[in-house]
Amino acid sequence: MCRYRWSLLVAMFVALPGLLHGQSGAERARLRGLLARADSLWALRAAQDSAAAQLVRAGRRARLWTDGDVAVALWGGVSSGAGDSLVAVAASQLREFGLVPVRFMRGIVMIEVNAADTAALRAAPAMRGRQPVLLDWVPGDFAGAAKVAYEITRAYGLSLDSAARVWLPSSAGESWELNREGARATRWLVEERTTSGTRCLAGEAGGCRRWLGLDDAAQPLSARYSTADIRRLLATYRYSNARLQACMGGDDGSCYKLVEENLTVGINPIPAPDDARNSLLHYVRATRGAEALQRVFEDRQGLMGARFARATGQSVDSLVLGWRAWVLSRGRPERVRTPVGEAVTALLSAGLLTFLATRRQRWQ
Amino acid sequence: MFRQVLSQQWVSLRVAVLVFVVISFAVPLLTVVYGGGLADTDLPRVAMWLDGSERIGVLLPGIALMLGVFFGLGVWQPDQVGKHVYALALPVSRWRYSLLRFTAGALLLAAPVAALGVGSFVATWAVDLPSGVHAYPAQLTFRFALASLVCFAMMFALASATRRVALWLFGALGGMLLADLLLAAFGSSFDVTPTVIMALVMFPGPLSILTGRWALFDV
């Protein structure tokens, strides 16, 4: 029926000019009636489209989910259980890692990209003043909570000063496991071929400082990379230019200038990759607590090495050597041992069970 | 009298003792089956080797548990088969008889523990460890001894209990499962059974000795 109606409309529009020309008055009146009918059908269709759009919009209307200080606006189609779980897990993950201060979390609200009509939510008294942070998340994605935690950490990273922003690894805030990410940091260190990295692996604190970008050198690049390192890293670089040719030809100055002027050639100002720097954050957290981790990034004075030293209350050298041992043992600070408490508990349990078994009088 | 009880238990448990002696001796040796010359090996390979050692170490609490189950139940088996006639014919009180049974069982338990100790020391001597990696044969044996003793005491107490106690225990277990089902039906995220299990296996729980690190070789 509907298809017939639209076919009729199309046929009418195609045939209309010919039909109007040379038609009698009665036929013209009939055609005008048909045109009026067509207009009303168009209006009906527009109203239907608008209603459908409103329905979709209502379905996508944002709903706010909060857990402690974490606030996330998700589209309306997310079920109660899924929303609760997403925000609770993200909040717990953030609390557990402890890098992002509560003050920062209270100042933002995550807005999922599919969520519509978020203005009303943001105008609510509890949400007023919170800065919106876009959350690119596909509902149903299992890693939704991790994504929320990651985006909040990323937003926090962007709010830091330039030294901390450059240093903070992009993987900070992602889920981190000793056997997976910790082992990856070990592999980076073991397979590292830059001068600073190999010196760090050999146990030289200065090498670790430079590799992790915690040194206080006036010219960090020349301290962190030797010209041999730069040439080796650039050996496979495709796009040749005069400075690159000069560097490869033996001009050391060109090598450093090349890296300083254009950091897109694949040489990061900090030799240690994200995984390695992330493992340092987890080391600080594991040994000095989440508060120390927060102090590192709350501190806006001086270079990163000095901030780490102040926050952890130890010299940068002892910090990096501790981290090195921790990473090489894949984050396991404790050796195989039976603590006295465990041994005593085991013996007491065995004694108590034996006592219970022997004190009975009945045989069966 | 202790000698008679011990001899009777040996007769009923000798197969289990021998099997566990062989297993306990062999498990530490599995960690060095891939080769002993590690001093000059590169670090990633050592890390892989340590991973392997840790995975094999995970078997040990399981063996300690099995040891406890077999020995704890086994020491009471002759009495249960003979309807306690032998025990009742002896001029000793029940608590003293139970203590004799426990001591004899614990003594038999020492054989697999000693075998694990010997196996661990043999494995340690067979391997040339790189700097930074250490062997923990004594610690591992001590931990295994404690874990076996706790499991043995637990099973010993359970096996000596009356049917009423056994029913009560099974009832408690069923009650926990039922409580979990009801809590889940009402949408609660609290689980009774996992909480109880965690309380048992996490310090200061009686079975906390079964968790923790069990590797023969580690940093």
Image (tube, rainbow, N blue to C red):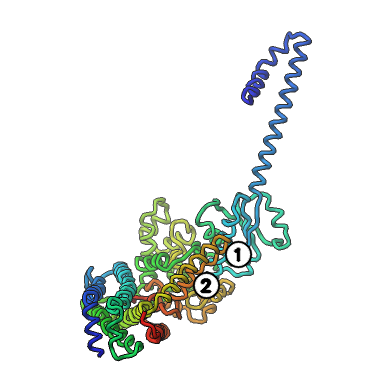
- The image shows residue A361 at horizontal and vertical percentages of 39, 85
In the foreground, B145 or A65: B145
Residue type, numbered disc 1: Ser
Q: Residue at x 26, y 82 (%)?
A: B108
Q: Chain of mark 1?
A: A
Residue A304's label in the rendered image is: 2
Say if residue A32 shows up in the picture. Answer: yes
Say if residue A226 shows up in the picture. Answer: no
Q: Chain of mark 2?
A: A
Residue A159's label in the rendered image is: 1
In the foreground, A258 or B156: B156
Earlier in the chain: of badge 2 and badge 1, it is: 1
Q: Quadrant of residue A9?
A: top right
Image quarter where the N terminus of chain A lies is top right
Instruction: Tell me if A152 is positioned left or right of A281 in this view.
Output: right
- The image shows residue B46 at horizontal and vertical percentages of 29, 70
Q: Secondary structure at mark 1?
A: loop
